[in-house]
DNA sequence: CTCGGCTTGTCGTCCGGGTGACCTGCCAAC
DNA sequence: GTTGGCAGGTCACCCGGACGACAAGCCGAG
């Protein structure tokens, strides 16, 4: 599985390991395959594994008592999740659901701990990852307070573009694989409002809407609209 | 400074250290005194120090372009901040301002790194702290999306009660030291709305309003209102 | 004591955006 | 092909909460 190794290597957790350490950890990886829409774990479950996405996309969601949902994030290849319970052993606070068919590498916490204890670079790498994540989350929070829905949509699209965008002939293709409903949950707004915002952007020629994707045509204007 | 040592010891960063390590790190601590309203550092500054609060309270704020502000959190004795730049060396993303007169212990990153590298429990402790912080922040985010302003105010007061509350004859005293304006920025709402929510709670007999403090009289009802 | 500046308590007004209600378009299964 | 279900597109309506504007209480400084 050369391909798999390559994707794993890019995950922050593995980045700092030497060949030997990587091989050892690699041995305790178990592969999980998910079909689109399938749930990996749910809020409240006991969690003692961490996952790295090998292919596909996974969303982390939280549900309110009344059934409404909120997407914390959408993750793609080489990205990691489920690591919080490693350091703070409590039930999962979000559910993980495959947005597309996906393949994941699962790692038991018990297999992991020795590496963290022994290899200081690994914990440093993890600290860095968590610090970055925290920064990001704070940004999102500020946006929720300061920015209106169209602005948040623009910002979210740019963020998705950073991670999943592919430069094409006719613009920056962002194949996010999300329905507008999911996009709405991601920015904390209703589907209708998100739809209106997207239509508005399209009308202005800033982007083109495609099935579960957008093509960004004027990144600069989008960026200005976002803040 | 026995008092100082005691407060420091409770900070997650120092908790896991043995006597020897504590003494060594203690030596490189520099004390900072702040008057109410004084700024310790500002958004965009270069940051290479981390702080532990010895006494008083400090708020972490972010400003929007138009001048509006948003409080990320209010921290009290034994709590730590400014650690993100340790692992992710970028300019500060928030400003730190004293809410009351305060004394802080400042630690340079360079003094700190050796400890992290050598003492694995320290990094574990830090990972735990960051993981907890991340969980918290995600909770706040969900609240922003799902909960109305009175609910967020109730939730925030309960949170403050956990950290600063003192059980008294006539209820749970929460001396938060915040103006209603600041409280409003903390829950992402306008001062007027927060004021109305507080008045409403007081009217119902759930709490009593005092200067920069509240006395919680019916914690159970507040808790139900929060979610 | 007195003045000025915060902080708090309350208005009316207005608007972003949530809600409910539909319709259309598309694809997949039969 | 037909049918059913899901995603996208658009309405009209209503409400929570922001905004602007003041009055009143409180406190620290002169």
Image (cartoon, coloured by chain):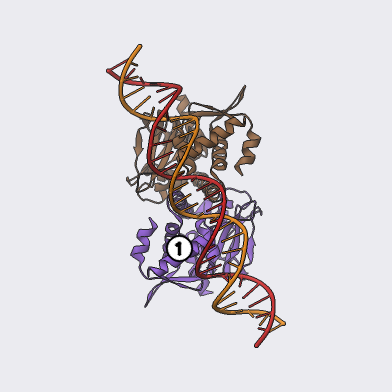
Chain colours: A purple, B brown, C orange, D red
Q: Quadrant of the C terminus of chain A?
A: bottom left
Give the SS element for disc 1.
helix
Using a 10 Å C-alpha cutoff, classify the residue at mark 1 as few (fewer than 14 neighbours), some (14 to 19) or many (20 or more).
some
Q: Is residue B180 above or below residue A97?
A: above
Residue A80 seen in this snapshot: no
**Residue at mark 1:** A197
Residue A13 pos. (x, y %) = 50, 59
Residue B153 seen in this snapshot: yes
At 48% from the left edge and 43% from the top edge, which residue is drawn? Answer: B189
Residue A41 pos. (x, y %) = 64, 60
State which chain disc 1 sits on.
A
The total number of labels drawn is 1
Q: Work out whether residue C23 or residue B217 is closer to the camera in this orientation and state it.
A: C23
Quarter of the view holding residue A185: bottom right
Residue A52 pos. (x, y %) = 54, 63
Q: Is residue B79 above or below residue A174?
A: above
């Amino acid at each position: 599985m050369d391909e798999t190794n390559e994707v794993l290597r890019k995950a922050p957790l593995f980045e700092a390991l030497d060949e030997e350490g990587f091989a050892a950890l690699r041995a305790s990886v178990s592969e999980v395959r998910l079909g689109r829409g399938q749930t990996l774990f749910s809020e409240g479950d006991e969690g003692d594994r961490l996952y790295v996405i090998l292919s596909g996309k996974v969303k982390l969601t939280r549900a309110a008592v009344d059934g409404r949902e909120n997407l914390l994030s959408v993750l793609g290849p080489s990205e990691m999740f489920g690591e919080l319970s490693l350091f703070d052993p409590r039930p999962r606070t979000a559910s993980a659901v495959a947005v597309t068919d996906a393949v994941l590498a699962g790692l038991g916490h018990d297999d992991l701990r020795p590496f963290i204890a022994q290899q200081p670079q690994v914990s440093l790498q993890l600290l860095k990852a968590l610090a970055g994540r925290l920064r990001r989350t704070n940004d999102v929070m500020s946006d929720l307070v300061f920015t209106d829905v169209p602005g948040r949509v623009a910002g979210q699209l740019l963020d998705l573009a950073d991670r999943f965008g592919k430069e094409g002939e006719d613009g920056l293709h962002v194949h996010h694989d999300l329905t507008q409903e999911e996009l709405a949950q991601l920015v904390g707004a209703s589907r209708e409002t998100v739809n209106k915002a997207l239509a508005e952007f399209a009308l202005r020629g800033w982007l083109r809407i495609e099935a579960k994707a957008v093509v960004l045509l004027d990144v600069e204007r989008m960026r200005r609209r976002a803040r």
